[in-house]
Image: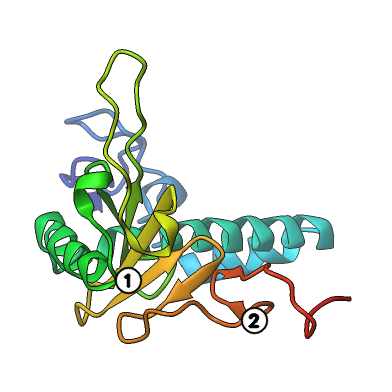
Amino acid sequence: MKKCGYCGRDNADDALHCLACGTGLNLRQSAAVPKPNILVRLAVFLRSLGRTQKICILSSGSFVLCVAAFIGSIYLHRPRMSEAQVISIANAAAITNGFFLAEYDSPHAKFEPWKHDHTWTVMYGLKITLPWAPPLPARRSAHGAPSHFFVIVSDKTGRSIFGIPGAIVGSANVLPPPPGVKIWPMRNKAQNDTNIN
């Protein structure tokens, strides 16, 4: 008996075609299709590629992996603290350093997981007198009431670092650093006898 490779029905030994579906019963055609070996096919495909093609595929794959890792690192690092908690910590640091928050606009907090080890940056901007608005009172904030200052808050520990563009002032030390000293992220550019070129 010949078994049809298409429908699986038995036919007579001398039959050339299946009586049920009409498929040819030639042994070569009715033989079961071998399962493809993916590793063998992949090896043959890689051997058929030229050196330039291999380099292009490798560099493209590396680029895609790097982009996927970067995007994954951004979306996997969710902040532990809320924006309200961060602004509360930043306001306390600003008040401790002698700033009057009434002289500044409402702060904006930005979470930066990929920059400075999962920190929030809270920016403060000085209120501007508008021509049609009443004049603002004299400024009383520390450091001459700079137009901008920021507070960096760690999302892991809640520790804050107070900063003024041009220098960073820690919450424990209110005085700015000595002139010419490089402190992250900017340099104090005031000149004296020790740092004149």
Q: Secondary structure at mark 1?
A: loop
Which quadrant holds residue 118? Answer: bottom left
Amino acid tagged 2? Val
Residue 112 seen in render: no
Q: Earlier in the sequence, mark 2 or mark 1?
A: 1
- Residue under the image location 11 percent in, 60 percent down: 82
> Which of the numbered marks, if any, corresponds to residue 181?
2
- Residue under the image location 68 percent in, 67 percent down: 189
Which is in the foreground here, disc 2 or disc 1? 2
> Which of the numbered marks, if any, corresponds to residue 137?
none
**Structural distance between the alpha carbons of marks 2 and 1:** 26 Å
Name the residue tied to disc 1: 118
Q: Is residue 132 above or below residue 38?
A: above
Q: Position of residue 12 (x, y in %)?
A: 22, 45
- Residue under the image location 44 percent in, 53 percent down: 146
Q: Nearer the viewer, residue 91 or 34?
A: 91
Q: Nearer the viewer, residue 184 or 18?
A: 184
Q: Position of residue 173 (x, y in %)?
A: 37, 85
Residue 145 vs residue 120: left or right? right
Residue 68 seen in render: yes
Q: Nearer the viewer, residue 140 or 62?
A: 140
